[in-house]
Amino acid sequence: MTRMRTAALACLAGLFLGTQSGQADPPRDVRAQFAEAMALHASAPQDGIAALLALAQAGYGRALDRLAYFHLTGQSVPRDPHAARALYAEAVAAGHSRSLVSLAKVEMTLGAFAEAQTTLDLARAAGDARAEPTLAWAHATGRLGPRSDPAAGLARLRSLAAENNRDAQLLVPAALISNPAAPDLSAPLRDRLEDRAAQGDARAAEALLRYLRLRADPTGTPEARVALLETPGLRPKIRIEEALHLAAVQQARRFWRAAEEIVATAPPAVLPRALVVTARLNRNAYLRLLQKELDALGYDTGAPSPYLRAPLIRAINRFCRDRDIALACKPGPLKSTTIKALAAELGTARAETTPAARPQDHQERGDGRPGRT
């Protein structure tokens, strides 16, 4: 960790002195190779990872940053936050200072609170506009552990939002979710976020959707959430999850059918989350989804039914044996550990049998906006 700090400080010192900081502007051919690697990852994930690894080994910071993100989220590689932390640190040392905010978030996740605060200080010194709102958000949400000052963090976040700082505006709803005793979203900020969403700002729509669902704000009507769900560019995982929660409110009596229609649009990487959310909302709807997924893979689950019947149980057990997750399935089909294990493996199975989707279905946006780690 000390070596990483030294490298990061040296990198930033180079930035301030106007010298090269670990990595000069890459040649066009390197940028083109990176773009090709990212496109390849969408259609052939393992080949894309190999191409990114080659660029990372050559010291290209953006490739290191993307590999870190994939390790953090478990996309095409095993989920490993420790590996993500190391890769983000390498990206910083290679001159990609925008990885500092992402590195700080991973450090918070791993409980390295002092290091996270130092990393955000480095990001602020490097001129990253996201650093100050992210630090305020970390305090407001308790992400800095015992170092957190929720009241001061929320106050600073509100102040930055009032100054029309977009990053802060997107983070205030999450801070309010973590501070249920705090006043609701102010009318001016709510209007500003709605304006942003209406202008196509998907991150603003996502922030409001989650806030309106999780916070007891009287303005969170189903109609308001429907309008936000129509914002172009919503990330699939947000769109699917929020649509499921909304359907449970608006279409309670036919939720099982609505869930089928929603989950059918989920890309493989989002399917596990969609199944878990459905199971929490309505076990019968989950069983129908589970039956459809297993049917599509060639397993005999019997006649369509929202109930846990013998043919479905046999199909589940066979699938668990075939995919080598029998131990995880042992507690029983409707136990949370089994549901999560089945969901994860069904996502993998769907990826194996589904033609390559568009790049945005496989990865988060890489624009450095809040919400990206």
Image (tube, rainbow, N blue to C red):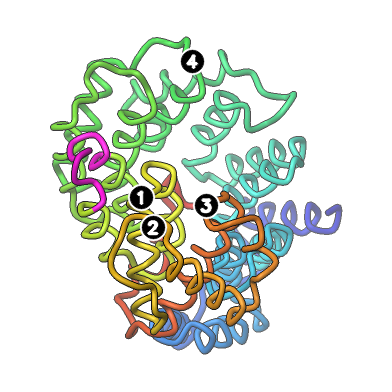
Dot 4: within a 10 Å radius of its alpha carbon, few (fewer than 14), some, or many (20 or more) residues?
A: some
* SS class, disc 1: helix
- Identified by mark 2, the residue type is Leu
Q: How much space separates mark 3 and mark 2, taking CA atoms?
A: 9 Å
**Residue on which the image places disc 4:** 155
Q: Nearer the viewer, residue 66 or 363?
A: 363
Q: Quadrant of the N terminus?
A: bottom right
Question: Dots 1 and 2: beta carbons under 8 Å?
Answer: yes
Mark 4: secondary structure: helix
Query: Which is in the foreground here, disc 4 or disc 3?
Result: 3
The residue that disc 1 covers is: 284
How far apart marks 2 and 4 lie (CA) works out to 45 Å
Q: Position of residue 105 (x, y in %)?
A: 61, 45
Image quarter for residue 236? Answer: bottom left
The numbered dot on residue 334 is: 3
Per the model, the C-alpha gap separating discs 1 and 3 is: 10 Å
Mark 4 or mark 1, earlier in chain: 4
User: What residue is at 65 percent from the left and 38 percent from the top?
Assistant: 121
> At which x and y percent is residue 205?
26, 41
User: Residue under circle 2?
Assistant: 287
Main secondary structure type of the part rendered in magenta: helix
Q: Is 1 displayed left or right of 165 in the figure? A: right
Q: Quadrant of residue 24?
A: bottom right
Q: Mark 4 or mark 3, which has the lower sequence index?
A: 4
Q: Nearer the viewer, mark 4 or mark 1?
A: 1
Residue 40: image tag: none
Report crowding for label 1: few under 14, some 14 to 19, many 20 or more residues within 10 A (C-alpha): some
Find out whether the residues at labels 4 and 3 contact each other: C-beta distance under 8 Å: no
Task: Give the residue type at disc 3.
Answer: Leu
